[in-house]
Each structure stands twice: as C-alpha cells, then as structure tokens.
Image (cartoon, helix red, strand yellow):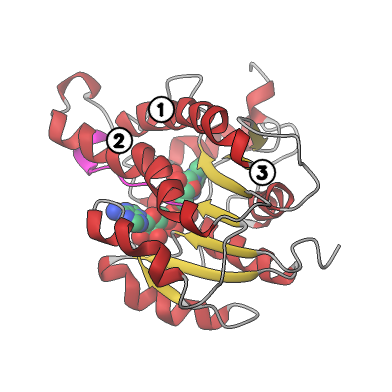
C-alpha cells in the first residue's frame, strides 16, 4: 500500500522519543509517501532533533509549545519554510501535572486541571486554527489521539476529563470545518509505553486490564497499529468520515468483562 500519502504534506505535532505515537505516525506517513514536518517544544526538543534522524527520511523540526500564543501565531509562516501547504495535521500532544492524575480527583486544584485541559484539549482546536492558512481548496485531514473517555478509569484523573473534552471538541471542529473540506477524527488507542503513559501514577493497571480482556490481544510496545490507522485517516480512503473516533485497542472497548 505504499504511496497512500503520496504528495501529501503532514505536520506531526508531538514527537518526543522513538516510543512516541507521533514518531510511529511520522515513520508510517513517510513510508506511505508523505512529506513530514514534526514539532515539539522545550527540553524535549534536543531529543526530538536526535530522534528524527531515525526516521526513514529527513524531517524538519519546528518549535511548538501549544501554551505559547506566539508559537501558535507564527506556526504557519514557520511551516512555510519547509512546505507550501498542509494536507494533514496530527495532534499527538497531551500533558497533565502529576497532581491532576492518580487518586484524589475531588481535591485537584483548578490550576492543575486547567493545564491538563489547555494542553490536551483546547490545543487540538488551537493547532488546527494555526494551520488553516496553509490548507488549500482540497481541504485537509486532522487526527488526534484519545483514550476512551466514555468511562472513568483508575489513575487517569483529570486527563480523563481532558480526553472527554477532546472527543466533544472533535465533533465541534468537524461540524465547523467540514464545509472547508477539513475532516477531524480521533484514534482511540489502547495503552502504549510512551513517556506520557509512564508519567501517569499507577498506569500499570491498564496493562493488566488489556492483557486480560482485549479480544485481539494487545502489545503495549507496538505503536504501529495506531500509526497505520492514522495513515488511513490522513489518506483519501475515508473521504466521508469526520467527527469519528476509531478504536485501535485490540477490541477492548467492545467487551464488558
Ligand atoms: N501512550 C498511551 O497509552 C496513549 C493511549 C491513548 C492515547 N494517547 C495519546 O497519544 C498522544 C501522544 O502521546 P504519547 O503516548 O505518544 O506520549 P509522548 O510523551 O511520547 O508524547 C506526548 C507529546 O506531547 C508533547 N507536549 C506536551 N506538552 C506540550 C506543549 N505544551 N506543547 C507542545 N507539545 C507538548 C510532548 O513534548 C510529547 O512530544 C497523547 O494525546 C496521548 O494522550 C496515548
């Protein structure tokens, strides 16, 4: 299926290590013919610059902290140094302070919850808005990453609320941007051993649950299924799909016990 993304210019925001969903997406997108630009911010940037060297092809790295208004306001012009338009935007970004996760949901301060919601929910809309000047008449496909927010999980805390917000934001964005040919969808992934997951206190509980219940089984170190589902959404194979959540979780969401 090589060439599914031939001619497409894709921004992958949120590539930190080789064990980042963003890295797996950037790799799969290149393998399917896309021209890829990646972004990250802060202390992680030096790791990102090193890690992109392990992609099949070179990929420019642009700086983007989604809490930084100036970064968002200048993103389109900085992307233009590398690409003459954008056909795909991948949002692989989330963060919550430790205090907003784990036990004690009812005690979490607004400032900690607010950070989780700004970085993990609002930034989806902000990233799309920042990229819109580069979207041409052919529209674009936008993909974000969800962890099933239809239930309350142990350990996940306000990040779960942020994901519920992300699911809702996806529907609002799909509604508003559909007339411009912009499709907005989420991949709801099972637990994967990234830095983000390692920072959730008690996240091992997810591994045990998936080992026991996922009908197809689940490999916590295999980022490829989430990445290839993203490639499918970025491609022209799903032109009438928007506001959708595609589960890439070994079927876990479909079973009760
Ligand atoms: N790992 C999992 O089990 C899992 C499951 C479902 C969904 N997800 C989601 O996948 C996405 C990618 O996470 P990952 O698991 O690959 O972890 P990761 O730690 O590899 O990636 C998270 C990225 O977010 C970036 N980020 C954090 N704050 C930012 C900010 N202010 N501005 C810009 N970038 C910022 C980090 O630098 C990093 O590149 C997240 O939305 C996450 O919630 C992860």
Of the numbered discs 3 and 2, the one sitting upstream in the chain is: 2
Toward the viewer: 204 or 79? 79
* Tag 2 secondary structure: helix
Marks 2 & 1, CB-CB < 8 Å contact: yes
Residue 73 at x, y = what percent?
A: 30, 57
Q: Give the total of numbered labels.
A: 3
Residue 192 at x, y = what percent?
A: 53, 49
**Crowd around label 1: few <14 · some 14–19 · many ≥20 (10 Å):** some
Identity of the residue drawn at 80% across and 61% down: 4
Quarter containing the C terminus: top right
Question: Residue 165, which numbered label?
Answer: 1
In space, the residues marked 1 and 3 are separated at their CA atoms by 26 Å
Q: Which residue matches tag 2?
A: 117
Q: In the figure, is residue 111 to the left or right of 126?
A: left
Q: In the figure, is residue 116 to the left or right of 219?
A: left
**Crowd around label 2: few <14 · some 14–19 · many ≥20 (10 Å):** many
Residue 20 at x, y = what percent?
A: 49, 60
Question: What segment is highlighted magenta in the picture?
Answer: 92-101
In this rendering, is residue 3 above or below 255?
Answer: below
* For discs 1 and 3, the disc positioned in front in the rendered view: 1
* Tag 3 secondary structure: loop
Identity of the residue drawn at 23% across and 42% down: 98
Quarter containing the N terminus: bottom right
Residue 93, magenta (yes or no):
yes
Q: Residue furthest right?
A: 1
Identity of the residue drawn at 33% across and 49% down: 199
Q: Which residue matches tag 3?
A: 218
In space, the residues marked 2 and 1 are separated at their CA atoms by 8 Å
């Amino acid at each position: 299926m090589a060439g599914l993304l031939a001619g497409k210019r894709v921004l992958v925001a949120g590539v930190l290590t080789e064990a980042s969903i963003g890295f797996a997406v950037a790799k799969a997108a290149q393998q399917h013919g896309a021209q890829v630009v990646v972004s990250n911010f802060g202390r992680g940037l030096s790791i990102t610059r090193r890690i992109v060297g392990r992609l099949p092809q070179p990929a420019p790295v642009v700086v983007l902290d989604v809490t930084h208004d100036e970064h968002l306001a200048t993103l389109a012009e900085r992307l233009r140094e590398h690409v003459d338009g954008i056909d795909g935007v991948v949002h692989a970004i989330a963060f919550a302070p430790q205090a907003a996760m784990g036990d004690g949901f009812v005690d979490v301060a607004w400032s900690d919850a607010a950070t989780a919601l700004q970085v993990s929910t609002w930034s989806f809309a902000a990233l799309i808005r920042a990229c819109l000047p580069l979207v041409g008449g052919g529209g674009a496909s936008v993909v974000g990453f969800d962890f099933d927010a239809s239930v309350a999980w142990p350990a996940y805390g306000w990040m779960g609320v942020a994901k519920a917000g992300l699911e809702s934001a996806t529907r609002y964005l799909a509604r508003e941007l559909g007339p411009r040919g912009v499709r907005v969808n989420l991949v709801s992934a099972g637990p994967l051993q990234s830095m983000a997951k390692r920072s959730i206190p008690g996240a091992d509980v997810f591994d045990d649950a998936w080992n026991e219940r996922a009908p197809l089984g689940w490999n916590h170190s295999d980022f490829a299924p989430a990445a290839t589902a993203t490639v499918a959404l970025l491609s022209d194979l799903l032109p009438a799909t928007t506001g959708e959540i595609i589960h890439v979780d070994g079927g876990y969401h479909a079973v009760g016990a």
